[in-house]
Image (cartoon, grey):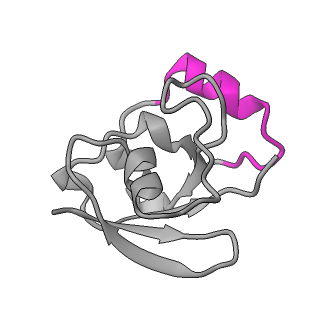
Amino acid sequence: MPKLVVVARNGNERTVEGDAGLSVMEVIRDNGFDELLALCGGCCSCATCHVHVDPEWTARLPAMSEDENDLLESSDHRNADSRLACQIPFTAELDGLRVTIAAED
């Protein structure tokens, strides 16, 4: 099972396992990170699964859609590493991906 490194808002880091084929949001949610709200359930209609992706992984991710970009525009905490976790498919190629849960808007 691929591993995902998640940094919580308080700075605590935990490595979790997730099934390939889920989204990064689902892996985070399924491993008990309650601070990632994911209110829309992964439909790309809110920005409550906002994460900051470690820069070394950015090039390995799928391109950001217009919808994702528009939703992230509404965040005061957006930066160059911002993504919506629901829009990142978790694959074996992303084993070791490191993300930080963004501050809540």
Specify whether 46 is left or right of 86.
Answer: right
Specify whether 97 is left or right of 82.
Answer: left
Image x and y of residue 101, in percent: 61, 59
The residue lying at 40 percent from left, 46 percent from top is 26
Image x and y of residue 100, in percent: 57, 63
Image x and y of residue 84, in percent: 55, 39
Specify whether 34 is left or right of 71.
Answer: left
100 w.r.t. 14: above or below: above
The residue lying at 22 percent from left, 40 percent from top is 21
Numbered circles on residues, count:
0
User: Which residue, as the protein is rendered here, is positioned at the far bottom?
Assistant: 12
> Is residue 77 within the magenta segment?
yes
> Is residue 8 within the magenta segment?
no
Specify whether 25 is left or right of 74.
Answer: left
Front position in the image: 67 or 15:
15
Front position in the image: 73 or 12:
12
Span highlighted in magenta in the image = 64-79
Would you identify the image quadrant in which residue 45 lies?
A: top right
